Amino acid sequence: MRIAELSRRSGIPVPTIKYYLREGLLPPGELSSRNQASYDEGHIRRLRLVRALLEIGRLPIATIKSVLSELDTPEPNLHHAMGRALRGSIASEPGPEGDREVETLIERRGWSVSPEAPARRAVADVIAAMHQLGWDSMLAQIDGYAEIADRAARLDMEVLARHSEPDEIVYSAVVGTILGDALIAGLRRLAQENASAQMYRRDGEPTPAATRECR
C-alpha cells in the first residue's frame, strides 16, 4: 500500500507518518520507484504502537526508540520492552518511609519485581501517606488488595497471550494497563456503592434505580 492508504487505514495523517519515518519510529517502506514506497500490515501495527506510546503512555521519543529497538531484535525480550513502555504511566518521587513495607510485601507475595520499578516507589509513597494520615486500618488489608491486583495482572496476561506479534503485545500492554486502571477504578466505585447499600441502606429505603423509575 502507498502512504496515503497507510494513513487512511491507520487513521494517522500523512505528515505525522512522515515525521515518524524521519525520527526512526517507523521503518521505511519498500521502494517501488525513486519517489514511491510501499507499506504493509507490519507498518500499521507499528503505527498503532507508536501512537499508543506517545499519546497514551506519554513516553519521550528516546524511550520509544529504546522500546522499538528491543522489539526489532531477532528474539525480543518482551518483558523488558513492556517494562520500558509502562514506566511512563507512573510518576512518583516518594521518600523512604514505605520502602521496607513494600519490600516485605513483595517478598511475602513471591513477586518478581525489579528494584528500579517505578511502581515499587509509587506504592511506598502511598503507604507512607497512609501512615501519616493514620489510615493503618486499610494497610492492615494490604495483602487482600495485593491478591486482587495479582488476579487483575493474570487477567491482563491472558489478554496479551491472545496476540503473537511483539508490536501488538506491547501495544495491548500499554493501552490495556492505562485504560485498565481507569476501568478498575470505575468498577471499584460501582462495587463500593453496592457494598454500601448492602451494609448501610435503611429498611424500606428505595434503591437509586427504583427512585428513577418513580420520577
Image (cartoon, rainbow, N blue to C red):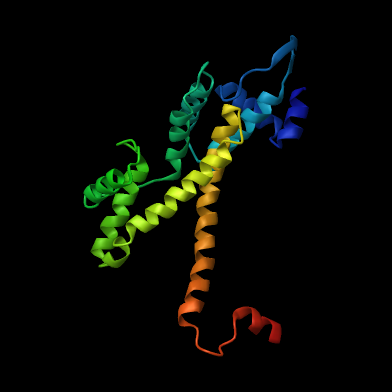
Kindly identify the residue that appears in the image at 25 percent across and 67 percent down: 134
Q: Is residue 6 above or below residue 147?
A: above
55 versus 131 height, above or below: above
From the top left corner, tell me how far across and down residue 39 is, in percent. Answer: 72, 21
Which part of the image, by quadrant, shows the C terminus?
bottom right
| 114 lies above or below 128 | above
Going by the image, does 46 lie left or right of 63? right
Going by the picture, which residue comes out furthest to the top? Answer: 34
Q: Is residue 50 visible?
A: no
Q: Is residue 207 left or right of residue 88?
A: right
Q: Residue furthest bottom?
A: 204
Task: Pinpoint residue 47: horizontal percent, then vertical percent.
Answer: 63, 31
Residue in front for this viewpoint, 200 or 170: 200
- Position of 66 compared to 39: left or right? left
Percent coordinates x, y for residue 78 in the rendering? 49, 28
Of residues 182 and 147, the one drawn nearer to the viewer in this rendering = 147
Across and down, in percent, residue 12 comes to 68, 35
